[in-house]
Image: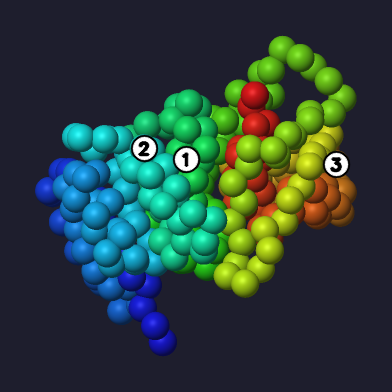
Amino acid sequence: MSKIRIALIEDHDLTRVGIRTALLQKEEIEVVGEAANAAEGLKMLKMLQPDIAIVDIGLPDKDGIELTRELKSTSNGEDLRTKVLILTLRDNKEAVLAAFAAGADSYCMKDIKFDNLLEAVRVTYNGNAWIDPAIARIVLQQAQQNPAKQDKVSLDTKNTFITSEPGENPEHIDAYTLTERELEVLQLIVEGCSNAVIAERLYITVGTVKTHVRNILNKLCADDRTQAAVRALRSGLVG
């Protein structure tokens, strides 16, 4: 079984050592390189081409978002081996949107539990996006506070970055829509609510919740609930 090759780009020594020590507890993971700034990190990533780069957003010479943008732009349309998992203390909407616009694959808070970090690494490695539920909740709550109250929320995906498996053609989606009810269900999903809890909160049956979830996944071309939240975020749902 091949190991997940990870590179760490983090300027705080204790944080970097802590992440490395935690990751190396799992035999499936190999830490192949480390860097303390963006310049060294970008050079390292181009040379080693790890499966995943865990990148701190607050690097001293250049932020992790700009590093991600430069890394992704070097692919020249070819398949890029390295996926980027942004690690940050920032939970504001602007930072999240900027990270995904730059091509980040996943987004985690620095206070993430170790088990959740492992899950994020595995999900990212398998070609899906992972977003910290707290961040997704903030963004989706912002969407629901949009003063333009309409029956449907239009999701423009022209600027969406959608990852695809090697050998597959990236699927292009012109536009899709979520109803207000589906948006409510999506928000509760990212809060970690089960179908039963969603049904209770929205005063609908579990069967109806399952239908809404299925429709949401279909409309967002998502494989699971976490990916659905990321697709909604990347598509410009929050304007």
Q: Kindly identify the amino acid type of the residue bearing the numbered disc 1.
A: Ala
Dot 1 surroundings within 10 Å: few (below 14), some, or many (20 or more)? many
Which residue is painted at 54% across and 56% down in the image? Answer: 77
Label 2 sits on a secondary structure element that is helix
Marks 3 and 1, how far apart at CA:
39 Å
Question: Is residue 166 placed above or below 119 in the rendered structure?
Answer: below
Mark 1 in CB contact with mark 2 (< 8 angstroms): yes
Q: Specify the quadrant of the image occupied by residue 155.
A: top right
Which residue is painted at 24% across and 44% down in the image? Answer: 38
Q: Which mark is residue 204?
A: 3
Q: Kindly identify the amino acid type of the residue bearing the numbered disc 2.
A: Glu
For the N terminus, give its image quadrant.
bottom left
Label 3 sits on a secondary structure element that is loop
Q: Does residue 171 appear left or right of residue 117 in this picture?
A: right
Question: Tag 2 or tag 1, which sits nearer the N-term?
Answer: 2
Q: Position of residue 34 (x, y in %)?
A: 19, 58
Question: Is residue 220 placed above or below 31 in the rendered structure?
Answer: above
Question: Is residue 16 placed above or below 78 in the rendered structure?
Answer: above
Q: Position of residue 132 (x, y in %)?
A: 48, 45
Of marks 3 and 1, the one in the foreground? 1
Q: Residue furthest left?
A: 13
Question: Is residue 147 placed above or below 161 in the rendered structure?
Answer: above
Q: Which residue has dot 1 on it?
A: 102
Q: Does residue 119 appear left or right of residue 44 in this picture?
A: right
Question: Tag 2 or tag 3, which sits nearer the N-term?
Answer: 2
For the C terminus, give its image quadrant.
top right
Q: Which residue has dot 2 on it?
A: 66
